[in-house]
């Protein structure tokens, strides 16, 4: 789907996860204030569904198709969504609740079990899988930088999802990000709800603002992530063809796991309902020899602690 927002974010992508819910990026349906008093993180101000009405066009591949627009009824964002030093967004997940359900036959991202989602997440990062992203980002270039407005037709690109260690080291190479972590005493493992992607071989690809919230599919068509941040850093030597980040849906189990589906469907129609969480049987990942070698080379990354942390935080990173 594509969702016209405002003059600064004219369009965003999204994926239908139920007949009434479109999953997109948190920053597509909210505004972030200006940092003040030395703060390096900002929480979002969620749009008002009436005053900031969004029209969602389901299944469109071109703006001139005249698809039937769906009115937004309510906007829900992850309770831990926050922008970090104007560089990236943690828990960048949001839901556009539609006033009317989508027409019969609309493609909806199928929910899967929590344990299967964890398996898929480990597989994609461990194998550094090549994944497909579709979005409305501009395809006009000036040199190596993107210019222009949103594309009039839906575009598709391929990206390589890199390992957790690769993404961690890439962020530590950005001095502003390291400054933000130390200033606010932030923990990268707690902030990191994204994966990093890079070009696939010689196939150059890039993201622009209209790609925000666009879905990423991996391996056997697994719905894996939504587009988070177009590039890791902005400076005079930067170009569009750099590391980008995507918010992995494993950090939004409440919306995407089938164990929660019944209560989630009720919740989007009545947010006063207290979610009921089923018992979660964790998936115990078996490390490969390459994982063990990487672990021994990195003293500050304890993957066993990270694994426990992931299972501990999964329930706390869902929409309340």
Image (cartoon, helix red, strand yellow):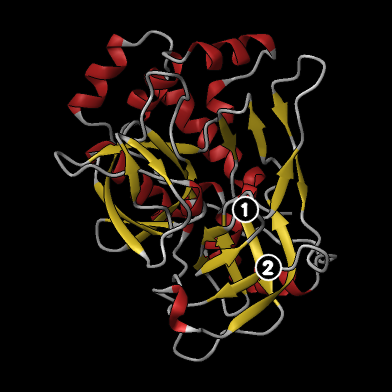
Q: Quadrant where the C terminus lies?
A: bottom right
Inspect this view and state whether residue 281 appears. Answer: no
Q: x, y (%) of residue 291?
A: 26, 25
**Vertical placement of 278 versus 263: above or below?**
above
* Left or right placement of residue 213 versus residue 44 in this view: left
Image point (83%, 64%), residue name: 51
* Left or right placement of residue 12 versus residue 299 in this view: right
Image mark for residue 260:
none
Q: Can you identify the residue that label 2 sits on?
A: 54
**Vertical placement of 170 versus 250: above or below?**
above
Instruction: Please report contact status of discs 2 and 1: CB closer than 8 Å, yes or no.
Output: no
Q: x, y (%) of residue 312?
A: 58, 37
Badge 2: how crowded within 10 Å, few (<14), some, or many (20+)? Answer: many
**Vertical placement of 66 versus 225: above or below?**
below
Name which of mark 2 and mark 1 comes first in the sequence. 1
Image point (54%, 46%), residue name: 251
């Amino acid at each position: 789907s594509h969702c016209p927002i405002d003059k600064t974010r004219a369009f965003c992508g999204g994926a239908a996860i139920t007949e009434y819910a479109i999953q997109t990026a948190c920053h597509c349906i909210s505004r972030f204030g200006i940092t003040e008093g030395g703060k390096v993180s900002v929480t979002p101000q969620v749009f008002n569904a009436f005053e900031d009405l969004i029209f969602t066009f389901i299944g469109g591949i071109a703006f001139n198709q005249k698809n039937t627009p769906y009115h937004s009824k309510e906007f829900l964002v992850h309770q831990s969504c926050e922008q970090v030093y104007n560089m990236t967004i943690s828990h960048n997940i949001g839901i556009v609740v539609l006033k009317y359900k989508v027409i019969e036959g609309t493609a909806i991202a199928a929910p899967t079990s929590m344990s299967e989602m964890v398996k898929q997440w480990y597989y994609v990062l461990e194998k550094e899988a090549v994944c497909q992203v579709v979005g409305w980002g501009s395809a006009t270039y000036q040199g190596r930088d993107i210019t222009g407005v949103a594309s009039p037709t839906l575009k598709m690109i391929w990206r390589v999802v890199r390992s957790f260690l690769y993404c961690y080291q890439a962020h530590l190479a950005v001095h502003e990000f390291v400054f933000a972590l130390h200033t606010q005493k932030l923990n990268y493992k707690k902030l990191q709800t994204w994966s990093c992607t890079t070009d696939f071989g010689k196939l150059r690809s890039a993201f622009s603002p209209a790609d925000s919230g666009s879905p990423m599919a991996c391996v056997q068509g697994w719905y894996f992530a939504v587009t988070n941040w177009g590039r890791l850093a902005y400076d005079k030597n930067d170009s569009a063809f750099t590391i980008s980040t995507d918010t992995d849906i494993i950090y939004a189990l409440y919306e995407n796991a089938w164990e929660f589906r019944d209560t989630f469907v009720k919740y989007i129609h009545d947010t006063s309902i207290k979610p009921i969480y089923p018992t979660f049987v964790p998936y115990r990942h078996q490390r490969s020899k390459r994982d063990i070698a990487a672990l021994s080379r990195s003293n500050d990354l304890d993957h066993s602690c990270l694994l426990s942390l992931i299972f501990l935080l999964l329930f706390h990173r869902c929409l309340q």
